[in-house]
Amino acid sequence: MELEDIKRICVVGGGTMGSQIAIQCALHGYDVTLHDISDDQLKRAMDSNKGHLERRVEKGKMSKAQVDEAFKKIECTTSLEKAASDADFVIEAVFEKIDVKKEIFSKLDEICPSHAVFATNSSYFPNSLFAAATNRPDKLVNMHFFHPALVMKLVEVMPGEKNSSEETVNITAELVRKIDKVPIVLKKEIPGFVVTRILWAIRKEAYSLLENGVASFQDIDTGCELGLNHPMGPFRLADLSGLDIQYNSMLGLHEQTQDPKDLPPRSLRERVERGDLGRKTGKGFYNYTT
């Protein structure tokens, strides 16, 4: 299959990442189906995308005609069969649970045309974990967008250890460029890929400094922002992404490594257990309600 053969893209998962990936593809000419199990979630997804793009129109970054044309190219549905039956490329963007992803890929394998490529947007699970769920392991690849997907340019493309074909990796990287993103292509499979592994190292040290009483999380953030020129420190970034997302990613890593050092730290676990998940709940490490 060539890049020109990709006409319809299916995105599975109508959360923040999935919905923004969908509109990014539509903005660059692709017909897109966005699937979620909830009609309410799909409506929230489209309302959120509309808000993002309307702000771009207000700032003169794009025209209203461009926005209207992109929305015409997206179809939302709660039927996976309707969403994926004629897809040439599928991007899975559901929450980070191995069993859930396996089930989705198994269903997609039955529904999609035989030529369709399957990509997972997982931020740390290698695609080979899902390869046995399909009869097309050679067409499975990691395609990791960064939050927020409408803004962040980078996409990590990673082959499975023994399954992904060179053609699958190449066409995925080409698609990334086609939708105005920048791919980095990994040469081998590794949990967490490139960027997340570097973030893990920074985050692990930041939590160690906090929990050993060396500095407050506010000062650690300030140190990273002003001393390392990071746009935001590790705790502010965790609040933005969602503490539950970070917590589950660490559990997922520990599941693969069985190393106690990879378990979520106490200060993160306690906040997640209280329901303080960051910006989306109004409170995480920082309080967003005042």
Image (cartoon, rainbow, N blue to C red):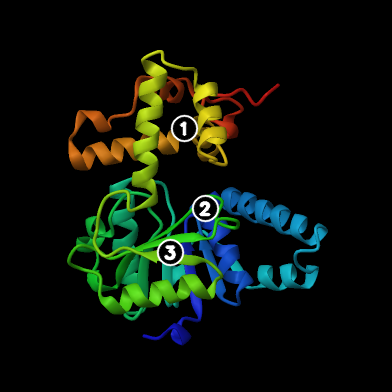
Q: Nearer the viewer, mark 3 or mark 1?
A: 1
Mark 2 burial class by Cα count in 10 Å: few <14, some 14-19, many 20+:
many
**Which labelled disc corresponds to residue 137?**
none
Q: Quadrant of the C terminus?
A: top right
Callout 2–callout 3 Cβ contact below 8 Å = no
Callout 2–callout 1 Cβ contact below 8 Å = no
- Residue 85 seen in this snapshot: no
Distance in Å between CA atoms under marks 2 and 3: 11 Å
Say which residue appears at 43% left-offset and 38% top-offset. 245
Q: Position of residue 52 (x, y in %)?
A: 70, 54
The three-letter code of the residue at mark 2 reads Met
Q: Residue 282 occupies which quadrant of the picture?
A: top right
Say which residue appears at 41% left-offset and 28% top-offset. 206
Distance in Å between CA atoms under marks 2 and 1: 16 Å
Circle 3 — which element? strand
**Which residue in the structure is indicated by mark 2?**
17
Circle 2 — which element? helix
**Which residue in the structure is indicated by mark 3?**
91
Q: Position of residue 202 (x, y in %)?
A: 39, 36
Q: Position of residue 99 (x, y in %)?
A: 28, 48
Q: Which callout, 2 or 1, points at the residue further toward the start of the chain?
A: 2
Say which residue appears at 34% left-offset and 37% top-offset. 201
Give above or below for 144 relative to 281.
below
Q: Is residue 64 left or right of residue 198?
A: right
The three-letter code of the residue at mark 1 reads Leu
Q: Quadrant of the N terminus?
A: bottom left
**Which residue in the structure is indicated by mark 1?**
243
Give above or below for 144 relative to 266.
below
Q: Residue 184 occupies which quadrant of the picture?
A: bottom left
